[in-house]
Amino acid sequence: MVATSLLAILVCPACRHTLSEVAQFPNELVCASCALGFPVVEGIPVLLLDQAQARS
Ligand SMILES: [Zn+2]
């Protein structure tokens, strides 16, 4: 889980859409707009495009 206060200020580095936690991909934050999943490593979101996975 990522702290709600942190999640509220995080945006997708590709499109600036907000990120969401989804049950289908635990340990990731997913952008609903461009369908990229960003890994969360030890509670820290890694918002780097070269670490992102396509999550359509
Ligand atoms: Zn995006």
Image (tube, rainbow, N blue to C red):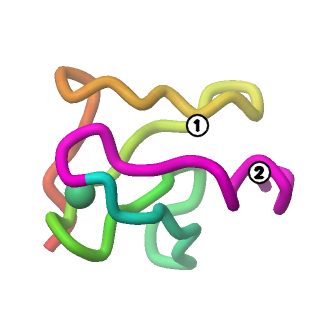
10 falls in the magenta region: yes
The residue under the point 58% across, 34% down is: 45
- Name the spot of residue 52 as percent of width and height, x first: 25, 37
Q: Picture coordinates of residue 20 (x, y %)?
A: 52, 69
**Which mark identifies residue 2?**
2
For the C terminus, the quadrant is bottom left
Q: Secondary structure at mark 1?
A: strand
- Picture quarter with ligand 1: bottom left
Residue 36 percent location from the top left of the image: 23, 55
Residue pointed to by mark 1? 40
Q: Nearer the viewer, residue 15 or 52?
A: 15
Which residue is at a point 85% across and 52% down the rendered structure image?
A: 3
- Based on the displayed image, in which of its 4 quarters is residue 8 positioned? bottom right
Q: Nearer the viewer, residue 54 or 18?
A: 18
What residue range appears in magenta? 1-15
> Left of 36 or right of it: where is 12?
right
- The three-letter code of the residue at mark 2 reads Val
At 62% from the left and 27% from the top, the residue drawn is: 41
